[in-house]
Image: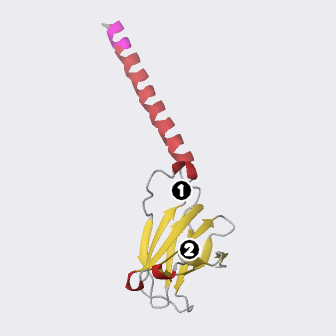
Amino acid sequence: MFRSINSLALFLALSALTVFAAHAVKADDAATSQPSSSNGSITVTVVDSDSKPVAKASLKLYAKVKKSDSDAKPKALDSGKTDADGKYTFSGLANGDYKINASFKKTHSKGSATVSVTDDSANLTVTITVASADSGNSGAATAPSAQAQ
């Protein structure tokens, strides 16, 4: 009987150790795959070809896709609409490369920009000029700049 209890105790101890080790590996893997910080922001200003702000322009934020991953259709990480001044801010962003698409249904205008959030440039501003699909110009973006806060 005593041997049965020792065998059962040993079995339970080994089972608990196995479960603990498997959980510890999963926790370590998750920690390395998560971005280091999520405090960056990108303030986007959408203007038309006359440099006038575009209110209610639709914005979508995407993680920039690597060429090797180009077969997969990216999903928007966030979206929003510009205010009366043509501005919208994406916040709580981790370091990384992002693409922002802007569109304005009323005039069928589109534009986009690509930006990188880093520790040195965590709060960026970018201006996207939306151009009509009829004009042949797909829209342009000014170079993003770091904004001191």
Q: Is residue 12 left or right of residue 30?
A: left
**How packed is label 2: few (under 14 Cα within 10 Å), some, or many (20 or more)?**
many
Q: Is residue 18 left or right of residue 112?
A: left
Q: Which residue is mark 2?
A: 42
Which quadrant of the rendered structure holds the N terminus? top left
In this figure, which colouring scheme has been used for the structure? secondary structure
- For residue 65, which numbered disc appears in the image? 1
Say which amino acid is labelled 2: Ile
Q: Is residue 75 above or below residue 115?
A: above
Q: Where does the image place residue 149, in percent across and percent down from the top left?
A: 64, 79
Residue at 45 percent of width and 36 percent of height = 23
SS type, badge 2: strand
Q: Where does the image place residue 22, in percent across and percent down from the top left?
A: 46, 32
Q: Where does the image place residue 98, in percent across and percent down from the top left?
A: 55, 64
Q: Is residue 53 above or below residue 75?
A: below
Q: Is residue 108 magenta?
A: no
SS type, badge 1: loop
Q: Earlier in the sequence, mark 1 or mark 2?
A: 2
